[in-house]
Amino acid sequence: MTTTAPSPLLDIRGVQHSYGDVVALRDVSLSIADREFFALLGPSGCGKTTLLRSIAGFETPQAGSILLDGQDLTALPAHRRPVNMMFQSYALFPHMSVEKNVGYGLEAEGVGKAEIRRRVGETLEIVGLAAFAQRRPAKLSGGQRQRVALARAIIKRPRVLLLDEPLSALDRKVRAEMQLELKRMQHEAGMTFVVVTHDQEEAMSMADRVAVLNRGGIEQLDTPVGLYSRPATRFVASFIGTANLLDGFATGSSSSGSAVDVPGVALFPVSHGFAEREPVTLVARPEDVHIVAPDAAPITGTVIDTFFLGGSSTVSVEVPGLAKPISCTVHAANVAERGQRVGLNFDSSRVVVVANPVEAAVAA
């Protein structure tokens, strides 16, 4: 017996949009499931906010379609879409109490007072502000004001809640706390969240899946673990976390003898599916590079810095032939000293090989 996969809640198909000669979105397609916490991640100008505004109805794509529950939203104005958007600026009414701010949208729609009171109470419980219902925004912290804005957005029970850089106005400590809180609130509200952020830590800690955008297109759509451990492109490898990127050429196309040749450095045995001499990049996370004795490794270098971080240390090793030092994460306080000569072993089962479009363009 075969089962049919459930239809996505939000289905974006071939969306394209430009501002004059500037292409903001290039044939973007992705699907988002019901009650999923989904993140659009990328640097400034990558198209993530344009995509969010297209879902909300504030931008009209020049091509493609956006479907919610199978209904094409493209022709619907923003106020008729079962979607709500929370902006970077919370825009709370300073003369109103928390409960009045949260219930304002329902009151404007003519919802009865008893129903407003009930739903405001439920929503303030979800965001942890029930005890602050009578306070005004000026008496709240930045994190609390952010919760009020979130409560005001979810009280109308949209099918999808869109959040544009929701934590950018908070300081680092409060932002870290709110990352966990947003995930909890999303579960309790039983709602689909789509968040735009340029902060990889936010996306990786909160989202079920992440779409990494670059220059208007999707570089990779995956889980946070997948993006970190199996980057599909050189851009994703460099943008997500810390990575050692060694540019070279694929060699030994057979599965038993494949390797990456980094000229002037070493030949690294690692499986890949690239053609002989195709430009590639070897991606090795710091925790997958191990410091050993100089005569027990394919490459050697000199320790130039050691940073003790508590439970681990980050060691930088300068290797002849490489423009940048190799970064290693070791679980010890004094594993290597500045000026010490060491060997480096790469965990071939964990390193990843991706195409190197920069080198390929130069070769062309």
Image (tube, rainbow, N blue to C red):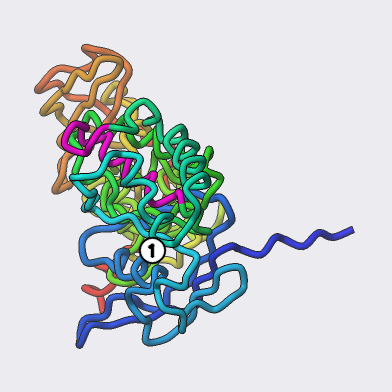
Does residue 54 appear to the left or right of 363 in the view shown? right
The number of numbered discs placed on residues in the rendered structure image is: 1
Picture quarter with the N terminus = bottom right
Residue 353 showing in the rendered view: no
Q: Mark 1 — residue?
A: 219
At horizontal 28% and vertical 76% (from top left) the residue drawn is 24
Q: Nearer the viewer, residue 140 or 329?
A: 140
Image quarter of residue 16: bottom left
- Indicate the position of residue 44 as horizontal and vertical percent values: 21, 61
Residue 282 showing in the rendered view: yes
Whether the magenta-drawn stretch holds residue 150 is answered as yes
Q: Residue furthest front?
A: 113
Q: Assign the magenta stretch its main secondary structure.
A: helix
At horizontal 34% and vertical 69% (from top left) the residue drawn is 53
- Indicate the position of residue 2 as horizontal and vertical percent values: 84, 60
At horizontal 22% and vertical 52% (from top left) the residue drawn is 91
| Number of other residues with Cα within 10 Å of mark 1, as a class: few under 14, some 14 to 19, many 20 or more | some
Q: Amino acid at mark 1?
A: Glu
As helix, strand or loop, the secondary structure at mark 1 comes to strand
Magenta-colored span: 135-155
